[in-house]
Structures are given as structure tokens and as C-alpha cells.
Amino acid sequence: MRTPEQIEGIILALETEYPLAECALHYEKDYELLFAVRLSAQCTDARVNLVTPALFARFPSLEAFAAAEPEEVEPYIHSCGFFRAKAKDIVLCARMLLEKHGGKVPDTMEALTALPGVGRKTANLILGDIFSQPAVVVDTHCIRLSNRIGLVDGEKDPVKIEKQLRAVLPPEKSSDFCHRIVLHGRAVCAARKPNCAECCIRQFCREFSGE
């Protein structure tokens, strides 16, 4: 595990390197982010951003999604993979948002994870980006980098990683930290070949130092 001073250094270095801690998915309405995250499962954010403009133009409101059948949504999201399951989840989610939440995206972990296709990763993203709540989004980049850096020790379970990161990250910085970890994972600390020479946090990294 890293010391509090090392963790502070990691946070500061990432803030300096990636001042804009933003979600890569494009959206205008709260529920659009919810649906875009569902589409991003086992799909790149870049692909989702290519798909959603036509999807949201065809179904311009939550009511339009709720009134649709999954088969009507499928052609618009086919290239995202697992399109049948994703289409079904989006339609059922739209209906539940209207029926149980007055057409609003809920702001609690419990309510969000009760929605079709919404797990803790998605819920945390919504809580952090939409509601500015302390959140820890554990995706593949977060799992990889948290272990490499030494924020967690050989842990692969997302729920356990979330719990451990919540214990060491300042709550007000946790959501942005996770966005920056994703940016760093894509730009520098790739899965197969990390570019340690260009890494802004290598001095704090357990794997770089060989600990």
C-alpha cells in the first residue's frame, strides 16, 4: 500500500497532467449518460460516441425509449456488441425511470443498482458526474493501475477495490481521480506495455520501483 504522502503525490501529479477530469462519453441529458454507460460495457467509449447521436435522435426523450420495443432499439446499437441485452435493458430502464422515479435518474446507489443493467460501476459514475457525490468508478483501467501503483495489493474484485480506494482517497477527489486514472491508463499505462518513461506518477509506482 502507498503511504498517505505518496497518495497525495499521485493525486497531485494526475491533476497536473490531466486538468480536465471528464467522462469520455458524450451526453446532454442525465439518462443519456446512464444509457451510454450501459452501451460501453465491453465496448469502447469512442464506438459508443459514434452510435449515440443517431440513437438519441431517433428516441429523443425518455418517453420515446419507454414506448419502444427492444427490437426497435437494436439496429442503432448493433455495433456496440451484446446489442439485444443492451437494448432490452435500456427500454426497461426507461420504463422504470418513468414509473418509479418520475422520469428522473435517482441519486442513490440502492435506487440506481435496482435499474436494469446498472451495476456499481455505472451507479458510481452517475453519482459522481451527475450528482457530484463522492464516487469510485472501478473499471478495467482502475483495476490495473490501482494494482500496479500499489493502491491495492493483488486485488481483482471491483467491489473490494472500491472499498479500499474509498478508504484512502479524499472523498471530494475520488470521482475525478477515477476519471484521471482512465485517461492515464489509455495514454500511458497500457495493459500490455506501460510507457514508464513518460509516466507522471512513476516515482510513486510500486511496479516501477520493483517493490
Image (cartoon, rainbow, N blue to C red):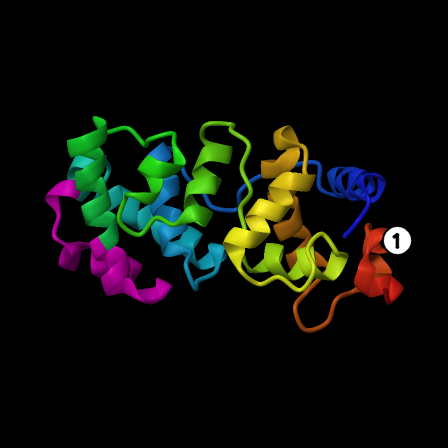
Label 1, residues with CA under 10 Å away: few <14, some 14-19, many ≥20: some
Identify the residue at the far bottom of this view: 192
Work out whether residue 169 or residue 67 is closer to the camera in this orientation and state it: 169
Image coords of residue 146 (percent x, y): 68, 55
* Residue at the (52%, 56%) spot, across then down: 158
- In the image: residue 11, left or right of residue 58: right
Work out whether residue 92 or residue 146 is closer to the camera in this orientation and state it: 146
The quarter of the picture where residue 29 lies is top left
The quarter of the picture where residue 149 lies is bottom right
Q: Quadrant of the C terminus?
A: bottom right
- In the image: residue 25, left or right of residue 36: right
* Residue at the (16%, 35%) spot, across then down: 63
Q: Secondary structure at mark 1?
A: helix
Q: Is residue 40 magenta?
A: no
**Dominant SS in magenta:** helix
For badge 1, the amino acid type reads: Gln
Residue 123 vs 159, above or below: the answer is above
Image coords of residue 44 (percent x, y): 48, 60
Image coords of residue 173 (percent x, y): 65, 33
Q: Is residue 82 magenta?
A: yes
* Residue at the (78%, 42%) spot, across then down: 7
Answer yes or no: is residue 21 visible. Answer: no
The quarter of the picture where residue 194 lies is bottom right
Work out whether residue 159 or residue 105 is closer to the camera in this orientation and state it: 159
What residue span does the magenta drawing correspond to? 66-88
Tag 1 residue: 203
